[in-house]
Amino acid sequence: MAVHALRQLSLDTVIQECHAESRQERQRESGYCFELFRRAMEEGDQAAWAAIAVQYRQLLLNWIYGYRAVTFTPDEAEATAHEALERFWRTLSARAPDITSHFAHVGALLKYLNQCVIATILDQQRRAQRRARLVERLQADAIALQPIASDTDALERLCRAEQVAQVRQWVQTHVTDPHEQLVLRLSFEQALTPAQIAQQYPQQFADAQAVRRLKERILKRARRGLSAIHDESATDMAVDAEQPR
Amino acid sequence: MAYTCIAPNEITEGDLLAYLEGSAPAAVVAHIARCPACAAEVAALRSAATMLIAALDRPACPDLDDLLLYQADLLPHAERRRLHRHIQGCVHCQQELVQLAAPLAATVSPPVVERIAEVGRRILTGLLQPASPTPALALRGHAPRQYTYQAGDYQLILAVLPPLVDEDVWQLEGQLIGYHAASFANDAAITVRVQQAGVVVVQDTLDEFGFFAGDQLAAGTYTLQIDLPDAQILIEGLSIP
Ligand SMILES: [Zn+2]
Ligand SMILES: [Zn+2]
């Protein structure tokens, strides 16, 4: 069917025909499913978007269960499917909202959707690794940090990609002094103590206390600069010691 | 309402951090015990430190959205180049890209899974021979096909899965039954190769349960070869689809 004719059809017709089209071989595809995606992405049609979620739910779940390295519970698989669709929408709205000029047919869109599933699973793996590392760090760290390590919900939130991105953004714009950058990298990425840092970089730091001063300065700025995130996730970890300010 | 420090002259910059690390002198510990303002500050610094530790894991790595867009070639040129430079030096991102590039196959249908498990409990002897295709599982119009081969005491089950995305490529999944990783010395990997006209197009190793898989097979005729320590299994004329 010609493109302009497809665009005249009611959404219900497009949905029904896409459903029928999905049962056909690829060669006999007639553009209804692509039109459904086009309406969702290019026209921002919420109903088209909802229909996509219904139409491709099972395919998404099949892909997710097909991932070999992880066994998903039904709830996890549903959540992953949902997240993958969100990622599809989010990334394309930001970078390729005019899907017609980037994707030739629905097969190309489905290939991208397949990659969104993989990206979502990889993101979950990153989060898990980040959390494992954080717990390890907190348990190895001084007594004062330990209570946090047992609050799994708070840790989970801290390791979310969006929150990590916000913190990194803050670091990039607010830690610009070379000495501070060095302290930040050595303390938080590489887990060195102030004494170890002072020992390894005697040219830069007179003693451990000099490192502590810089580190405390960074943390105080971070506390103020990241107060929005802090209020949401971090206060409940520190509730035992938190006082009204 | 903010507290103010009860005795600012008792505390210098770096002391609160020393307290956090458990290395503060007794006088500082005593001050923090008495001073609500400093105790609150310590708690806040602790939270900030935790946030920074969490955020600075793989600090230079692009997030998955960007990696995905990179893989799909949907990034503007400058950003693409920036990511490219990072990826060249980052094994983590390289591994993730490899995974992003390999399309996920849908699950093997339950009948095939059951069949593999069921066959796994029996040891059949006989010649290498194809089994009849399984009942259809309609996935975008194509059905996966399943074959059983007998090679010596080994049984090999192959499932050819139809394309799910726009490319005309097929996936091959298999299990070698009668193979037990523990029965072979050390952990020497058992290699599976799929070749066409002498060229290896897919290579995988058996996992501990004897499973292997290959993606991106174009329609055609292949030879499958499994190198065991004590034998070589050869299946010729494997036709895909
Ligand atoms: Zn005080
Ligand atoms: Zn990286």
Image (spheres, coloured by chain):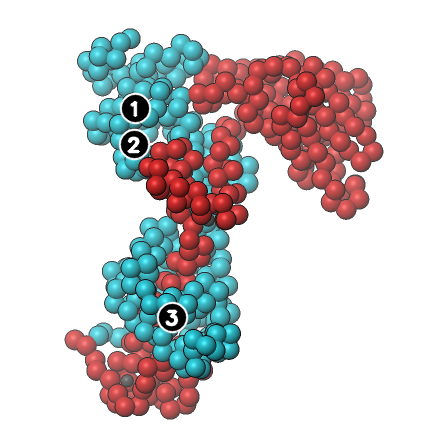
Give the residue at the far right of this rendering. Answer: B230
* Amino acid type, label 2: Ala
Front residue of A210 and B17 = A210
The residue indicated by pointer 2 is A96
Quadrant housing the N terminus of chain A: top left
Q: CA distance from mark 2 to mark 1?
A: 8 Å
Front residue of A193 and A228 = A193
Q: CA distance from mark 3 to mark 2?
A: 40 Å
| Image-quadrant location for residue A50 | top left
Figure colour of chain A: cyan
Q: How far across and how far down the image is residue A154, in percent?
A: 37, 59
- Rendered view: A175 above or below B156: below
**Mark 1, secondary structure of its residue:** helix
Labels 3 and 1 within one chain: yes
**Mark 3, secondary structure of its residue:** helix
Figure colour of chain B: red
Q: How far across and how far down the image is residue B28, in percent?
A: 37, 87
**Looking at the rendered structure, which numbered label has been put on residue A179?**
3
Give the residue drawn at x 44%, y 68%.
A187
| Chain bearing mark 3 | A
Q: How far across and how far down the image is residue A216, in percent?
A: 35, 75
The residue indicated by pointer 1 is A101
| Chain bearing mark 2 | A
Labels 3 and 2 within one chain: yes
